[in-house]
């Protein structure tokens, strides 16, 4: 797909990985609408308030942009439970699935309003296929997201549906600051083949690849510095 002249909606498009994807789409000549619950101004990008859990609001957004070409969903969608299973609050575990439901809502409600040659990119995460301490809930959600991507790709063809699975990426998702932030990223990536945190831009480049490449669907691109293969 040539991005120039296309219309893109990027949910979670105002921060981190989603923001970098919004900017790259804008720079490639797309009309970009970035949706989230934050009020902010981004140069050359229209921002809209939308909660991915609000199906009515999502429907309104997609209807208003009928015929649009590109859907990206990078919204975390809600809280995440980061604990070992035996210490985990089970409501918290269930709540972590807010990410999946935000993705499901957007794919189901957007598809009828997209161009036949449209494409979607959803953001998973490497815990879907790699055990890490405290990541059981997030990994389980990621596994569901990746299975959803493959099934949705089959049902929605010719619309293409792909996924991007980041490793540890330095984004505003982490509230840590200063030395604590530096130590967290160093420790959590020390066993990676490329031992550093990735950047939002490195993830966005993979999203752009999946959007531009008309021969990709139902696939997941890992951008994890070899995190899945590392110890
Ligand atoms: N960073 C990592 O290390 C990493 C690793 C693996 C996977 N991921 C995945 O990558 C994706 C992006 O993460 P990120 O690191 O870029 O996080 P981020 O910087 O915190 O950005 C998340 C974005 O999602 C939006 N969002 C969250 N809940 C929403 C909701 N209910 N409705 C609408 N928008 C919502 C946020 O805006 P508002 O809060 O203002 O709504 C924000 O724009 C997520 O799916 C995350 O699970 C990240």
Image (spheres, rainbow, N blue to C red):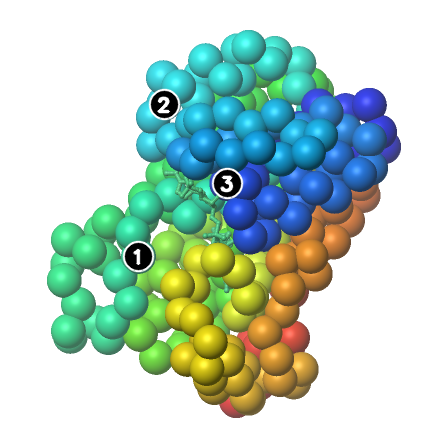
Neighbor class of circle 3 (other Cα within 10 Å; few <14, some 14-19, many 20+) is many
In the figure, 129 relative to 106: above or below?
Answer: below
Question: Which residue was labeled with disc 3?
Answer: 12
Q: Position of residue 48 (x, y in %)?
A: 50, 25
Q: Earlier in the sequence, mark 2 or mark 1?
A: 2
Q: Dots 2 and 1: beta carbons under 8 Å?
A: no
Q: Dots 3 and 2: beta carbons under 8 Å?
A: no
Question: Which residue was labeled with disc 2?
Answer: 55
In the figure, 120 relative to 55: above or below?
Answer: below
Question: Which residue was labeled with disc 1?
Answer: 80
93 to the left or right of 230? left
Q: Residue at x 55, y 88 (%)?
A: 191
Residue 81 quadrant: bottom left
From the image, state whether disc 3 or disc 1 is nearer to you: 3
Measured Cα–Cα span from mark 2 to mark 1:
21 Å
Give the secondary structure at mark 2. Answer: helix
Q: Position of residue 160 (x, y in %)?
A: 67, 35
């Amino acid at each position: 797909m040539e991005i120039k002249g296309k219309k893109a909606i990027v949910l979670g498009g105002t921060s981190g990985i989603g923001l970098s994807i919004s900017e790259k789409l804008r720079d490639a000549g797309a009309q970009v609408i970035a949706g989230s619950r934050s009020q902010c101004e981004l140069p050359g990008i229209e921002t809209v308030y939308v909660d991915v859990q609000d199906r009515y609001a999502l429907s309104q957004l997609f209807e208003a942009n009928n015929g649009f070409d590109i859907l990206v969903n990078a919204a975390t969608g809600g809280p995440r439970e980061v604990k070992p299973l035996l210490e985990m609050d089970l409501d918290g575990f269930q709540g972590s699935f807010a990410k999946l439901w935000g993705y499901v809502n957007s794919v189901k409600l957007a598809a009828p309003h997209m161009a036949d040659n449209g494409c979607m990119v959803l953001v998973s995460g490497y815990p879907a296929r790699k055990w890490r301490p405290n990541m059981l809930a997030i990994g389980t959600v990621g596994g569901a997201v990746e299975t959803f991507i493959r099934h949705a790709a089959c049902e929605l063809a010719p619309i293409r549906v792909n996924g991007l699975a980041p490793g540890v990426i330095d984004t505003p998702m982490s509230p840590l600051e200063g030395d604590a932030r530096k130590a967290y990223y160093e420790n959590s990536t020390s066993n990676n083949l490329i031992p550093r945190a990735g950047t939002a831009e490195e993830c966005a480049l993979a999203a752009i690849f999946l959007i531009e490449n008309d021969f990709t669907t139902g696939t997941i691109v890992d951008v994890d510095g070899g995190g899945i293969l590392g110890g």
